[in-house]
Amino acid sequence: MSEKVVSDYNGYDYKKIFWEDADREYEDQADRMAIRKLLPKRMERFADIGGGYGRLANEYLKRAHKVFIFDYSKTELKQAKEIYGDRIETKAGDIYKLPFRDNELDGLMMVRVTHHLEYLDKALAELYRVLKPGGVAVIEVANKRTLPKMVRFAFGKSKVNPFDKTVANYKEISAGGFFNYHPKYVEEIFSKTGFKIERVLSVSNFRSRGLKKIFGTKNLVKMENGAQQMLAPIRFAPSIYYKLRKPEE
Ligand SMILES: C[S@@+](CC[C@H](N)C(=O)[O-])C[C@H]1O[C@@H](n2cnc3c(N)ncnc32)[C@H](O)[C@@H]1O
């Protein structure tokens, strides 16, 4: 394994343990809603980067002629192949050295991956390289500046200051750590890399066990739909989605 891969999903049943056996219907629906709003309707060559077992594949299979699912984990890719067969092509490798040519793709997305990346700038440079001019990248970023994190910091329950722009590394969560980002920090990297931000959404705004109990998943999903755009200007949620474009040359 490359020393830069901090989370190895080989041998881990992410599909069953993280999604099917857990109460995450709301989070799953929130991701899908955002992707539908941001991904172009028609693409020639598209890749789901860190796509795992292809949880979100139904959101892009109809929009793209050729679909790749790229991931480090062979366990995830094997599951993806079992589910989607010839409708996808899987590619294994490390995000810091993507197995795509320069300007090869006209669309890509990367969801729930940034929290595993120690070198976000390098990963984004790779995404930029493989995207063709005019191409679109939909990227989800794990946000450190959320309301619960502000409250925890204010009451001394966490040392991570959600207001400063440095990357938060929650070492206690897993051996390698878990990264969260300040939106301004990420947006500066997008800009340095060359990406233009076209749209921002605040996603999974009501991610809380308590709220699920009070309102129920169905109602939270309805509330989420309006909140994604409304709360985007303040980058409120634990997931911030960006629609980025590589400018035409
Ligand atoms: C939380 S899962 C998200 C999977 C999928 N995008 C989704 O939303 O269901 C994170 C995925 O990123 C992959 N990953 C983490 N670091 C990686 C790296 N350096 N290169 C390639 N894949 C990586 C993991 O193997 C895992 O499948």
Image: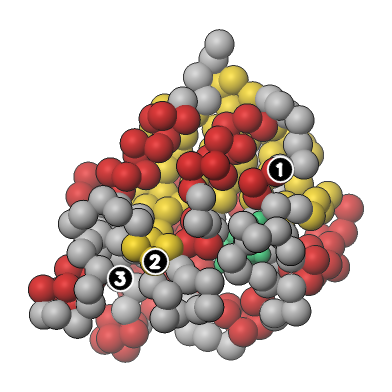
Query: What is the CA distance from the residue labelled 3 to the residue labelled 2?
Result: 23 Å
Residue at the image point whose x is 54% and y is 42% from the top: 122
Q: Residues within 10 Å of mark 3 (few under 14, many from 20)?
A: many
Q: Residues within 10 Å of mark 2 (few under 14, many from 20)?
A: some
For badge 1, the amino acid type reads Leu
Residue 57 seen = no
Which corner quadrant of the image does residue 164 belong to? bottom left
Ligand 1 closer than 8 Å to the CB at disc 2?
Answer: no
Q: Secondary structure at mark 2?
A: strand
Q: Residues within 10 Å of mark 1 (few under 14, many from 20)?
A: some
Residue at the image point whose x is 70% and y is 59% from the top: 2
For badge 2, the amino acid type reads Asn
Query: What is the CA distance from the residue labelled 1 to the residue labelled 2?
Result: 24 Å
Residue 117 seen = yes
Q: For residue 206, which numbered disc appears in the image?
A: 3
Which corner quadrant of the image does residue 84 belong to? bottom right
Is 71 situated left or right of 83 in this image? Answer: left
Is 9 situated left or right of 163 in this image? Answer: right
The residue at which mark 2 appears reads as 169
The residue at which mark 1 appears reads as 98
Q: Where residue 210 sits in the image (x, y, percent)?
A: 28, 86
Residue at the image point whose x is 70% and y is 80% from the top: 13
